[in-house]
Amino acid sequence: MRMKKKKYLTERLEAVSEYLYTSVIEDRNFKTAIYDKDYIDFDSWFEKSQPLYLEVGCGKGKFACEFAASHPEINLIAVEREANVIVSACELAQKMGLKNVRFIKCTAEYLERHIQPESIEQIFLNFSCPFPKKKYACHRLTHHGFLEIYKRIMKPTAEIHQKTDNMKLFEFSIEEFSQNGFALKNVTLDLHNSKFEGNIMTEYEEKFVSQGLPIYRLEAYIK
Ligand SMILES: C[S@@+](CC[C@H](N)C(=O)[O-])C[C@H]1O[C@@H](n2cnc3c(N)ncnc32)[C@H](O)[C@@H]1O
């Protein structure tokens, strides 16, 4: 479903242009469009050259901005496909005066078009859309189609950290990771009652935790 365009969206996007790269894609075929590379020069976009982390599906950017603020030694790229949403993320980064977070408006299928192979040290998948119907399973961000993309842009030692409230998505993800060359560690079925320290709550996480729902979390790495 297409989201309704927010009032003044164009003006708001222009006002945060230093934070935002908008992917322009003429070829709508995911499979062929990625052969036409349009790599972003992260060394000149960020003020400092330092390890690159990636969040896919960042929503309104609460996690991305809080993570960036508490990890000045890391550059975080946050990707989101909805303009209506990513504009709020950029505005938050601007308000917080962050230098080490930048946003790409694109759908995850095009990550490889803009990010060089073996350049990412960590990927965050926070409360990705579950797409409960089987026929839409290929849109889940832990479907093997996406895992293959992540593998190509990840450094060999990189990790993927996933959090979700959705047990079915979590089970699906564990299977997909396990069958596609990843090993798992630090798996918890109740993050907020575990020994995990330093958790940064996302927007969706705050909502689910306030409803008393358990949060599932895992870390995946290439075997
Ligand atoms: C359920 S929201 C979670 C937002 C945020 N991560 C949080 O935890 O509060 C999922 C977000 O992922 C984005 N998304 C879903 N599929 C995507 C894709 N293929 N590429 C980029 N963003 C995607 C949606 O637009 C939505 O904003």
Image (cartoon, helix red, strand yellow):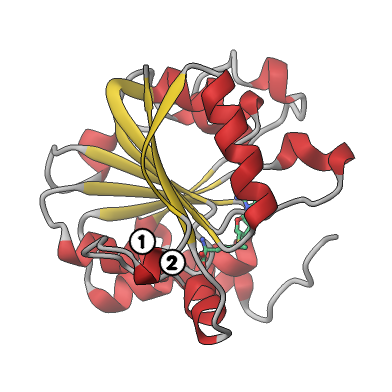
Name the residue tied to disc 1.
Answer: 64
Dots 2, 1 in contact, CB < 8 A: yes
Name the residue tied to disc 2.
Answer: 61
Res 41 visible: no
Res 126 visible: yes
Disc 2 versus disc 1: distance between alpha carbons?
Answer: 5 Å
Q: Is the residue marked 2 within 8 Å of ligand 1, measured from its CB? A: no
Q: Quadrant of the N terminus?
A: bottom right
Could you tell me how many numbered marks the image carries?
Answer: 2
Residue found 35% across the figure and 53% down from its top: 102
Task: Estimate the x, y position of residue 28 in percent, counting from the top left.
Answer: 76, 30
Q: Quadrant of the C terminus?
A: top left
Where, by quadrant of the figure, is residue 61 drawn? bottom left
**In the rendered structure, which amino acid carries the disc numbered 2?**
Gly
Quick one: label 1, few (<14), some, or many (20+) residues within 10 Å? many
Task: Estimate the x, y position of residue 204 in percent, counting from the top left.
Answer: 54, 72
Give the quadrant of ligand 1.
bottom right
**In the rendered structure, which amino acid carries the disc numbered 1?**
Ala
- Numbered disc 2: secondary structure: loop
Residue found 20% across the figure and 66% down from its top: 69
Task: Estimate the x, y position of residue 20 in percent, counting from the top left.
Answer: 43, 54
Residue found 25% across the figure and 63% down from its top: 195
Query: In the picture shown, does residue 185 fall above or below 200?
Result: above
